[in-house]
Amino acid sequence: MLNTFFDNARQSTDFSFGVCRTDRTKHRLAEEGNPFVRKVLSPDEYTAYEMLRFQKRQVEWLSGRIAAKLAVAKQYYMLGRKFSWADISVHNDARHAPFVPAFPEWNLSISHSQEFAVAVLSRRPIGVDLEKIESRPRQLADYFCCGDEKNVLAELEQNEVLWNQRMTWFWTRKEAVAKFLKLGGAIGFHQINTIADRPTIGDAFVNPIQLLSEFCGDYAVTIALSSE
Ligand SMILES: CC(C)(COP(=O)(O)OP(=O)(O)OC[C@H]1O[C@@H](n2cnc3c(N)ncnc32)[C@H](O)[C@@H]1OP(=O)(O)O)[C@@H](O)C(=O)NCCC(=O)NCCS
């Protein structure tokens, strides 16, 4: 389902994507251990991987790198270049936004949530966010949502399932905008209004962005694309 969402989204703008199942990464790690990690990661990445202390984080981080490299591999294929997993490095800048030094003018975005890691790569600014739909505390809306979003959620207050779906929907839209702008958590999420597919920050359209969101099974997913 995620693959179909990304394939359809590619009709709006040109980007490549990768999807990685975290349980497969976990399985390969258990079966093959470090040789698997060394096959997938560049030496720089391997050093970063070794510094991750918890297995859950190692699995999600590695899955994010695999998804990113699948997206890079598609570009290599289009360019007729030979792809090798460990020759490609994915780094994070000072604000932790990911990038591929081999494609300095390209934009990469990564998200992981429970069973999946996804990545998108484009010449134009891009952001992706995936979240599993789960029960969320009601205070989240107070902290993170703007007035318009709170109004929608207030209408759903009596229906926990719909409330959680909609909250997760808004969440992915806000995170995708934050990643598009390469700001991550350094943005005031309550200032981003994602009611419309052209989101605003405060009262302004900043870098015109188009949001594409969908529910895929138990997940909500959003891509923020450049709308110019
Ligand atoms: C880190 C953050 C960008 C996203 O966190 P998240 O949604 O919990 O996690 P995701 O798996 O979707 O995204 C993590 C990835 O975002 C990317 N990322 C981190 N900082 C980024 C930035 N400044 N710009 C773009 N991408 C960034 C990284 O690639 C990271 O993966 P990696 O560490 O494996 O490289 C940031 O928004 C954050 O701190 N969020 C906190 C969660 C929250 O309170 N959300 C409220 C939303 S309503």
Image (spheres, grey):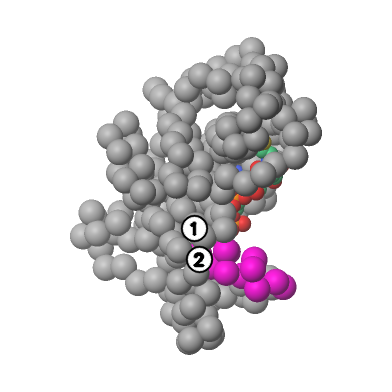
Q: Residue at coordinates 60% horizontally, 37% vertically from top-left?
A: 161
**Nearest to N terminus: mark 2 or mark 1:** 2
Q: Could you say where residue 100 lies in the image, as x and y percent from the top left?
A: 47, 56
- Using the image as rendered, state which of residue 135 and residue 130 is in the foreground: 135
Task: Name the chief secondary structure element in magenta.
Answer: helix
Q: Secondary structure at mark 2?
A: helix
Location of residue 160 by image quarter: top right
Taking the magenta stretch, the answer to whether it contains residue 37 is: no
Residues at circles 2 and 1 in contact by the CB criterion of under 8 Å: yes
124 is higher (above) or lower (below) than 26: above
- Using the image as rendered, state which of residue 7 and residue 228 is in the foreground: 7
Q: Residue at coordinates 68% horizontally, 26% vertically from top-left?
A: 157
* Residue pointed to by mark 1: 116
76 is higher (above) or lower (below) than 199: below
As shown in the figure, which amino acid type bears the numbered disc 1? Phe
* Residue pointed to by mark 2: 22
Q: Residue at coordinates 45% horizontally, 71% vertically from top-left?
A: 24
Q: Could you say where residue 119 lies in the image, as x and y percent from the top left?
A: 45, 52
Q: Is residue 169 left or right of residue 18?
A: right
Q: Residue furthest top?
A: 203
Magenta part of the protein: which range? 53-63
Q: Residue at coordinates 45% horizontally, 26% vertically from top-left?
A: 210
49 is higher (above) or lower (below) than 38: above
